[in-house]
């Protein structure tokens, strides 16, 4: 079945499509990262032999995606031997084309070239001419002067050049399409695809208030997973990548050991990050002229929300906010890392469906 969803995230690129054999959505992910390796006459052969995904720019070789992290981890272990200096010179640091939810073109000159290569490898060619692809873009942050215009336009143009018919939706609206929250109108009764969604990613927290699928308000707030990792690593005196690994595999916000500096720091920065996002969220909603007179469901997704205990902490901090509406419920998406890509797929399939249902235009008769 044609139609593709694509979540272009700071840490992960995720493609979703319908698996015609198994049925249901299938997700393919690639790490949004790259690593420069030293070049000599054998570099290209070595990269090919190992089947590593790579690109070459200006005589330099770059390993892409998950392969970059694997290589980096491998060489970091080897580095502890006598050859430390030699190996340190062979690979650089793991670099990322995106930062804070958007392309990092100011600080990372290769960001556009690398992300295009990563995306082209992940998505491949459309299954048919003009297959619908829906991707998501973050909202403009309310607490910084970053603009998403370049990021969104560059991606739209590039995806179109791959042969797709491109749709773009706000990142947090994708969660509404995926999780289908239902608000209750005192007069009308159930109002499907209505509520508030939060996407806690790596660079940003994206928020959307949707009513019957329409994004009435959508914006983002800075500080999310990367912020937590960077700040906690400083406090605990460990490497950022070590704290990320610990956070993703061992952290449980329900069960913090205060004597472990990593846990204590992660707990504090998780709280700080949620407080920051909910304070800005409440401020934005309290500026609205109109009263929202129906209780609204809240749905949370994004990798940063997948740590055990996140929802409980979110609800505790939410209760302290003064909001211009009642909260009907708070739910965590079943698979927070894939929810956005799934919502993009739902939209792509809907557009494909509409295209099929539309009567084909008859060729206009010549009047001459
Ligand atoms: N099991 C886990 N526990 C805690 N954090 C996790 C877990 N899995 C992933 N993360 C964190 O989630 C973040 C990535 O989430 P996600 O893929 O939703 O972000 P993204 O879409 O790449 O970023 P953004 O939307 O900000 O551009 C990272 O900070 C990562 O460390
Ligand atoms: Mg995201």
Image (tube, rainbow, N blue to C red):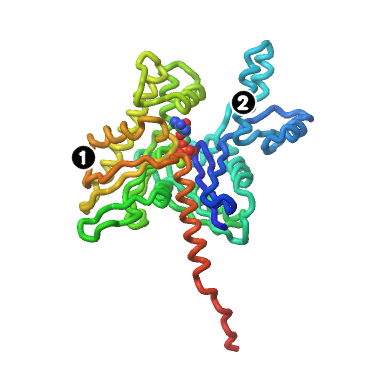
Above or below, 198 relative to 358: above
Image quadrant for the N terminus? bottom right
Viewer-side residue, 286 vs 135: 135
Pointers 1 and 2 in contact (C-beta within 8 Å): no
Question: Within 8 Å: ligand 1 and the Cβ of disc 1?
Answer: no
Q: Mark 1 falls on what kind of element?
A: loop
Above or below, 323 relative to 87: below
Residue that appears at 44% across and 21% down:
233
Question: What residue is pinned by disc 1?
Answer: 322
Residue that appears at 45% across and 44% down:
339
Q: Within 10 Å of the Cα at label 1, are there few (<14), some (14-19), or many (20+) other Cα atoms? A: few
> Which label belongs to residue 72?
2
Q: Which quadrant of the view contains residue 95?
A: top right
Question: Within 8 Å: ligand 1 and the Cβ of disc 2?
Answer: no
Q: Mark 2 falls on what kind of element?
A: helix
Is there any visible trace of residue 275 in the rendered image?
A: yes
Q: Is residue 278 left or right of residue 89?
A: left
Residue at the outermost front position: 22
Residue 318: x and y in percent read: 27, 36
Viewer-side residue, 245 vs 17: 17
> Which label belongs to residue 91?
none
Viewer-side residue, 322 vs 329: 329
Q: Within 10 Å of the Cα at label 2, are there few (<14), some (14-19), or many (20+) other Cα atoms? A: many
Residue 110: x and y in percent read: 60, 38
Residue 222: x and y in percent read: 39, 37
Q: Considering only order in the chain, which callout, 2 or 1, is on the residue closer to the N terminus? A: 2
Residue that appears at 69% across and 38% down:
56
Is there any visible trace of residue 101 in the rendered image?
A: no
User: Whole-Å distance between the Cαs marked 1 and 2?
Assistant: 46 Å
Residue that appears at 35% across and 44% down:
299
Image quadrant for the C terminus? bottom right
């Amino acid at each position: 079945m044609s139609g593709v969803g694509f979540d272009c995230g700071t840490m992960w690129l995720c493609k979703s499509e319908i698996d015609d054999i198994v049925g249901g959505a299938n997700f393919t992910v690639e790490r949004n990262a790259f690593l420069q390796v030293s070049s000599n006459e054998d570099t290209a052969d070595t990269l090919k032999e190992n089947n590593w995904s790579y690109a070459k720019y200006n005589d330099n070789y770059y390993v892409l995606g998950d392969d970059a992290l694997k290589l980096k981890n491998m060489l970091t272990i080897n580095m502890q031997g006598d050859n430390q200096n030699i190996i340190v010179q062979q690979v650089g640091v793991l670099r990322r084309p995106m930062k804070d939810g958007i392309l990092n073109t100011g600080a990372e000159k290769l960001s556009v070239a690398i992300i295009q290569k990563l995306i082209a490898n992940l998505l491949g060619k459309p299954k048919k001419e003009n297959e619908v692809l829906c991707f998501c873009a973050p909202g403009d942050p309310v607490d910084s002067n970053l603009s998403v215009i370049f990021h969104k336009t560059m991606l739209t143009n590039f995806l179109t050049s791959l042969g797709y018919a491109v749709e773009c939706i706000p990142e947090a609206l994708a969660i509404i399409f995926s999780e289908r929250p239902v608000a209750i109108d005192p007069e009308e009764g159930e109002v499907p695809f209505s509520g508030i969604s939060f996407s806690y990613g790596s660079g940003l927290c994206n928020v959307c208030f949707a009513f019957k699928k329409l994004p009435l308000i959508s914006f983002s707030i800075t500080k999310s997973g990367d912020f937590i990792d960077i700040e906690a690593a400083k406090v605990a005196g460990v490497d950022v990548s070590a704290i990320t690994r610990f956070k993703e595999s061992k952290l449980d916000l329900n069960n913090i050991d205060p004597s472990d500096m990593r846990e204590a720091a992660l707990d504090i920065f998780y709280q700080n990050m949620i407080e920051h996002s909910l304070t800005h969220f409440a401020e934005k909603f309290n500026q609205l002229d109109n009263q929202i007179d129906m209780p609204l469901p809240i749905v949370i997704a994004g990798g940063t929300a997948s740590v055990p205990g996140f929802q409980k902490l979110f609800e505790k901090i939410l209760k302290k906010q003064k909001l211009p509406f009642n909260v009907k419920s708070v739910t965590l998406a079943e698979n927070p890392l894939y929810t956005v890509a799934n919502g993009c797929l739902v939209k792509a399939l809907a557009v494909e469906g509409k295209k099929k249902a539309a009567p084909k235009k008859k060729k206009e008769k010549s009047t001459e």
